[in-house]
């Protein structure tokens, strides 16, 4: 099934992704709707195409929350199973991706609640590979990794709703409007949560000696 | 101490959400404090990117991933099919049991027959006659005058 890809969606956060699932999210909405409508009538191939396109958006978001590849894999599968079950109820008020992100966030929240997960650092878990394209930043690769570890630790310590806001914005590149749809809240609440998340993260990084400055905060 | 409202406004611009307002560059150029805050936000964004490992399901892994999804969907449908199967069997068993009970209890209602007691017609000039055979079957005879047109 060949698909013409059009970049109509993301901010710069997704401009450098490849086309192995994550990048394929930048689609013409009409194409998505066509696939969704076909899938709603029981077209198995259309549903498979939707899974193929959005698997990495779902998987990445799950990874950000549960920080374990195996768990994220299971959660992602469960998200698509739930999606299939609820597909007939999807009206298209929001984009398909936004709807998926909402299901994923809720699934992760439930998972974390159930397990009261004591998260494991990705590198310790050994399941994640280091990205080849990870930018080293101004310092060395070791320093970049240290910063990465620091923010992971800080992210763990902030409330789920704040973490969700930060992850959706900074790591998934969603707009405020899309974030509001995913989190089921108003734009003002989105801004508030994002602001609190950034504030806490800057403080956390500062404590660990990584932030440029939080002197004014 | 910076006001949170002010920070949120800068964050809006930083996130590209401040359509119709200042551009980030303009704000940064004329307000050193804003410039410093934007620098902090950029540092945070960069740090977040450092934290992101390559989290993807490759094309090679996709068949295995989708197989799990397919199995999950199938299992749920299978579960539902099983539920319907059990419900159907239960209903069939209840009907069969009820029928058997009625037959064996001998409480079948008495058989009835329709008896023709009288026959009439509105056709002008026609006559109706009723006759019973030895078996009790009724035969109705209708005689219409010759030359009458219907």
Image (tube, rainbow, N blue to C red):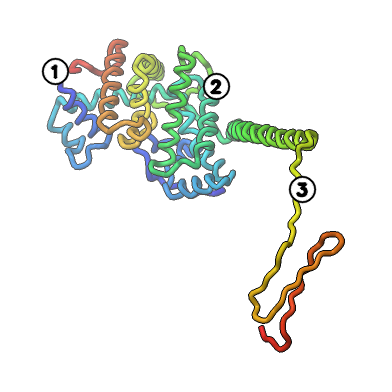
Q: Are marks 2 and 1 on the same chain?
A: no
For the residue labelled by badge 1, is the local secondary structure a helix, a strand or a loop? Answer: loop
Residue B29 placement: quadrant = top left
Q: Are marks 3 and 1 on the same chain?
A: yes
Q: Is residue B130 left or right of residue A37?
A: right
For the residue labelled by badge 3, is the local secondary structure a helix, a strand or a loop? Answer: loop
**Residue A127, image x and y in percent?**
53, 20
Q: Which residue is mark 1?
A: B1
Q: Return the chain for callout 3.
A: B
Q: Return the chain for callout 1.
A: B
Q: Which residue is mark 2?
A: A70
Between residue A141 and residue A145, name the one nearer to us: A145
The 10 Å Cα crowd at callout 2, few under 14, some 14 to 19, many 20 or more, is: some
**Residue B70, image x and y in percent?**
61, 35
Q: Is residue B81 left or right of residue B38?
A: right
User: In 3D space, how far apart are the residues under numbered discs 3 and 2 (Cα atoms)?
Assistant: 72 Å
User: In 3D space, how far apart are the residues under numbered discs 2 and 1 (Cα atoms)?
Assistant: 44 Å
Residue A213 vs B34, above or below: the answer is: above
Q: How many marks are shown on the rendered structure?
A: 3
The 10 Å Cα crowd at callout 3, few under 14, some 14 to 19, many 20 or more, is: few
For the residue labelled by badge 2, is the local secondary structure a helix, a strand or a loop? Answer: helix
The 10 Å Cα crowd at callout 1, few under 14, some 14 to 19, many 20 or more, is: few
Q: Which residue is mark 3?
A: B111
Task: Determine the residue positioned at 40% across, 19% down.
Answer: A141
**Residue A163, image x and y in percent?**
36, 22
């Amino acid at each position: 099934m060949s698909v013409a890809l059009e970049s109509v969606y993301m901010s710069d956060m997704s401009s450098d992704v490849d086309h192995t699932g994550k990048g394929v999210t930048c689609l013409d909405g009409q194409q998505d709707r066509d696939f969704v409508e076909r899938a709603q009538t029981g077209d198995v191939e259309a549903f498979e195409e939707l899974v193929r396109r959005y698997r990495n958006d779902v998987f990445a978001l799950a990874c950000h929350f549960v920080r374990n590849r195996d768990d994220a894999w299971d959660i992602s599968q469960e998200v698509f199973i739930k999606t299939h079950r609820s597909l007939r109820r999807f009206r298209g008020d929001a984009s398909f991706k936004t709807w998926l992100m909402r299901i994923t966030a809720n699934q992760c929240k439930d998972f974390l609640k159930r397990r009261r997960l004591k998260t494991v650092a990705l590198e310790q878990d050994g399941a994640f590979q280091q990205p080849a394209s990870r930018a080293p930043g101004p310092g060395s690769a070791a320093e970049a990794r240290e910063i990465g570890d620091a923010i992971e630790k800080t992210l763990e310590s902030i409330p789920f709703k704040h973490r969700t806001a930060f992850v959706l914005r900074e790591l998934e590149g969603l707009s405020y409007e899309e974030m509001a749809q995913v989190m089921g809240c108003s734009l003002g609440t989105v801004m508030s949560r994002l602001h609190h998340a950034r504030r806490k993260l800057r403080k956390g990084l500062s404590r660990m000696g990584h932030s440029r400055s939080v002197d004014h905060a | 101490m910076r006001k949170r409202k002010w920070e949120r406004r800068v964050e809006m611009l930083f996130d590209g959400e401040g359509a119709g307002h200042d551009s980030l560059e303009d704000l940064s150029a004329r307000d050193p404090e804003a410039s410093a805050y934007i620098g902090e936000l950029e540092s945070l964004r960069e740090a977040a990117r450092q934290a992101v490992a390559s989290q993807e399901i490759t094309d090679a892994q996709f068949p295995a991933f989708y197989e799990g999804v397919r199995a999950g969907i199938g299992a749920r449908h299978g579960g539902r099919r099983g539920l319907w199967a059990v419900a159907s069997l239960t209903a069939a068993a209840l009907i069969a049991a009820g029928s058997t009970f009625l037959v064996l209890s001998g409480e079948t209602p008495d058989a009835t027959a329709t008896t023709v007691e009288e026959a009439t017609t509105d056709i002008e000039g026609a006559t109706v006659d009723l006759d019973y055979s030895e078996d009790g079957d009724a035969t109705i005879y209708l005689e219409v005058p010759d030359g009458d047109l219907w």
